[in-house]
Amino acid sequence: MALLLYELTESFRIAFAQIRANKMRSVLTALGVIIGIVAVTLMGTAINGIDIGFERSLAMLGDDVLHVQKWPWFGAEDWWNYVNRPQVLPADAERLNRVIENTPNSLLETAVPVCARGASVKFGENQVGGVFVQGTTSDYARLMTADFEDGRLFNETESIAGRQVCVLGKDVADALFPTSSPIDQTVTIQGQPFQVIGVLAKQGSFLGLFSFDTQAIMPLNAFRKYFGVRRNTELQVKVKDKLQLAAANDELIGAMRRVRAQLPGERDNFTINQQQAFKAQLDPVKSGIALAGLFITGLSLFVGAIGIMNITFVSVKERTKEIGTRKALGARRRTILLQFLIEAVSICLIGGAVGLTLTYATCLALQHAMPALPVEFSVGLVFVSMAVSVLTGIVSGFAPAWGASRLDPVVALRYE
Amino acid sequence: MTPPPAPAATAARPIRPAGSLVIEIEDVSKLYKMGSEIIHALRGVSLEIRRNEYLAIMGPSGSGKSTLMNMLGCLDTPTSGRYDFNGKNVAHMSDDELAGIRNREIGFVFQTFNLLPRSDALRNVELPLIYAGMAPHARHERAMQALANVGLADRVHHRPNELSGGQRQRVAIARALVNNPSIILADEPTGNLDSKTGTEIMELFEQLYEQGQTIIVVTHEEDIARHARRVVRLRDGLIESDGAVF
Ligand SMILES: Nc1ncnc2c1ncn2[C@@H]1O[C@H](COP(=O)(O)OP(=O)(O)OP(=O)(O)O)[C@@H](O)[C@H]1O
Ligand SMILES: [Mg+2]
C-alpha cells in the first residue's frame, strides 16, 4: 500500500517535472482539453442559467395563475379555429366568478380580467415609450406578485368608476420622475391625464428579455374608455393550491364551458394558458444548447485526446532508455504504466483547470456586464470537468503507457 | 634490480574467501532472431559465482558479454538452460518477481551511467529505494549515506550535467549499492571515462570488494580486468577460459 503511494507521488513528481521541461509542448497539447472543458462548463452554466432565470421569471408571472385567452401562447396551428372564437371579455370574468362561487370545494379562487397594450407615458418634457399598459380591476391585488415601493393599487370604488388613476412600474417612474416622488402627480397616457397613486418595486426582466418594470396599471373601465372596448381581454385566474394546478386547470375548462354555454362535444372556444407552456417552449432551446455544447466538447476532447496520446507516445519514445534504466533498478510494469498514465492525466488536469478558470472568468465578466442575466458558476461543474479531464487522460494515455510498461528492459536499455 | 610492477601490485591484494553460491547457470544459450537470421549470442554457457567474488568477463566485441550480463542481472531470460539466483530458478519467475530481484539483489552500473538527467544525485540514488517502497525519510538518509560512501557528500544536489564523468559513475555506483544488493553488475563501467578516472572507479570497486561486495565487471581492457580476482573469457558465445588472475 505504501509502495503504491510512493509510486504515485513519484509519478506525479516526474509528470510535473516533465511538463515543466516541455512547457510549450504541454500547453499546445492541453489546448484541446481546455477548449473541451470550456465548452462543457459553459454549456452547463448556460442551461443552469436558463433554468434559474426561468424559475425566477415564472415566479414573477405568478406561478399560481392560469390565463384564459382566445389564443394559445404557442403553437396555434389551425388558425381558422382560433380566429373565429368569440373574444374574451370582462363580462366573462364576472360570469366565471359566479360559477366558481357556486362550485363547492372549488380549486379556483378568483378570475380577474386584464387588458393590455403598449403606449407611451408622459410627464412634462419626459416621455417613456413602449410601456406595457394594463387595465384591470381592484381584484388584481389578489394575484399580483409585485410589491409596492410606494402608494397602493386602486380600490374597488375607483375601479368600478373607472377613475383616471394609475400605478407605474419602477423604470417608468424613475424615468419620468428622476428627482421627485411620482405619487399624486399627473402623467399623460394616450393623451389622457392619470394620477399616479402607486409605484411598484423593481422586479427585473423575464429571461433578460422583457422588463416587468416598464409597465403601468390602470382601472379596466378607464382603459376600455380610452383604448377601446373591443380589445382582447384575458382572464387571470388564481388557483388556491399551485400543487393542484392540473386539476384546477380541468375545473377551469369546465367552468369556462358553462360560462360560454358550450354544448357537449363542442370544441372549447377559449384556451387556458399557463407558465408550463413557457417551460415546454424552452426545452428545445436547452437541448439545442446541450447538443451544440456536447458536440463541441466531444470534438475538442477527441482532438485533445489524440494530441495527448501522441505526446505520450513521443514521451515514451524519448525516454525509452530511461524506462530501461528504471526497470533495471526495479520498476515494475505497474510503476511504468502509472508513470505515463499520470503524465497524460496531469496534462489533462492542467488543461481542465485552465478551462475551468476561463469559464469562471467568463461568468464573472458576464455577471458584471449584464447583472440581469442569471449566470451562475456551480461547484458541480468543477467536479464534472475534473472527472472529464481525468477520464480523457486515462483514455488517451493508456495505449502509450501500456506499451511503455511492456517494453523489454534489454531492448529499452539499448535504445539510443 | 626493478621488480615487475603488475605482479607486485597483484601480489599485495587480499583475496577474500568465497562464500555461498549466488549465481549458478548451466548450459545457458540465447538466440536472437533477426528476420530470417538466427544469432547465437550465447551457446551453452555454464558458470558459478559465489559471494565475495570479484569477476571480470572479457572477450572481443560481439562475443556475448553484455548478453550474459543482462541474463545474470535478470533483465533477460535464457532461451534454454538453467539459471538459479540464490538457489531460486529465475525461469519460473513472473515479471514483477524479476523486477523485485533486480531491485533488491542486483546493482547495475552502466557504461553510459544512465542517470536521470533532470533529477539530482540524491534523487537518482533514492530511485531504487522508492521502488522498494521505503518511506521518504528513511530513503533520504540511506541515499545520503550511499553518496557519502562514494565520496560525493558535497555533490548530492548536483544534477548529472553538473558532474564530471567520474562523479556521474560514482553516483551510479551509489545507486547500485543503496539497496544492499547481493551482487554488483558493471558493464564496461570505465568505457566512457579517461584512464585516470577509470582507475579511480576501479579503486572504488576494489574497496567495495574488500568490504565484502560481490562484483562482476564486463570489460575488454586487460588493465581493468587485472583488478578482478577471476577472469572469464568469452568468444562467440562460449566460455573460452575461466581462471584466477595473477
Ligand atoms: N537485441 C538483440 N537482437 C539481435 N541481436 C542481438 C541483440 N542483442 C545482442 N545481439 C547480438 O548478440 C551478439 C552478442 O552481443 P553482446 O551485446 O552480448 O556483445 P558484447 O560482447 O557485449 O559486445 P561489445 O563488447 O561490443 O559490447 C552480437 O552478435 C549482437 O549483435
Ligand atoms: Mg557489450
Image (cartoon, rainbow, N blue to C red):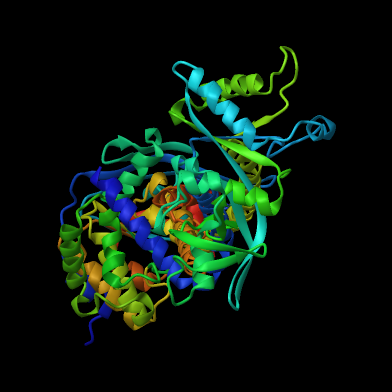
Towards the viewer: A120 or A344: A120
Give the residue drawn at x 23%, y 86%: B2
Q: Which quarter shows the N terminus of chain B?
A: bottom left
Q: Position of residue B132 (x, y in %)?
A: 26, 50
Q: Is residue B49 left or right of residue A345?
A: left
Residue at coordinates 58% horizontally, 53% vertically from top-left?
A: A305
Q: Position of residue A37 (x, y in %)?
A: 53, 55
Q: Is residue A339 left or right of residue B151?
A: right
Q: The C terminus of chain B lies in which quarter of the figure?
A: bottom left
Q: Is residue B12 left or right of residue B123?
A: left
Nearer the observer, A105 or B204: A105
Residue A216, position as x, y percentages in the image = 56, 57
When asked about the image quadrant of residue B94, the answer is: top left
Q: Does the image show residue A349?
A: yes
Residue B3 in the image: above or below residue A211: below
Counting the numbered discs, the total is 0
At 20% from the left and 58% from the top, the residue drawn is B136
